[in-house]
Amino acid sequence: MARGGYRRKRPPRKGKFDPSDTKNVKQSSVGVWDLYEEIQPELAHIPGSSRLEPYLEIKQNLPFVWRMLKDISSIRACWFHLALYLIVECVASLVPAISL
């Protein structure tokens, strides 16, 4: 127990998602489902910022994507599979245009 015989209320952890927090969470109904979306604190004061949120998330995740690509490129045998995958994806994307 803390001093004085009472417990201090801990501030919410950064990684904890609380759907009842209306300041940081937007709730909307999609049919019979409830959709909870976290509001980015960096964009909370900017009107129309919902369009910028995906780009902010991409910016925040770029270091992880870069590290993943570096780890993949460090595996010598993976270059062949990565190149093959890219070629197959490019060919598959052209199939609808060729079929016209």
Image (cartoon, rainbow, N blue to C red):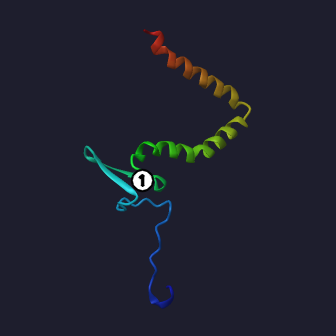
Q: Nearer the viewer, residue 53 or 66?
A: 53
Q: Quadrant of the C terminus?
A: top left
**Total marks placed:** 1
Compared with 74, 36 (above or below) is below
- Residue in the image at 66% along x and 43% along y: 67
Q: Nearer the viewer, residue 12 or 40?
A: 40
Q: Is residue 45 left or right of residue 33?
A: right
- Residue in the image at 47% along x and 90% along y: 4
Dot 1: element? loop
- Residue in the image at 40% along x and 58% along y: 24
Q: Position of residue 72 (x, y in %)?
A: 67, 37
Q: Amino acid at mark 1?
A: Ile
Q: Is residue 30 left or right of residue 53?
A: left
- Residue in the image at 51% along x and 16% along y: 94
**Farthest residue, direction bottom:** 4
Q: Position of residue 34 (x, y in %)?
A: 30, 50
Residue 64, by quadrant, is: top right
Q: Nearer the viewer, residue 27 or 96?
A: 27
Q: Which residue is mark 1?
A: 39
Q: Position of residue 70 (x, y in %)?
A: 69, 39
Q: Position of residue 16 (x, y in %)?
A: 46, 61
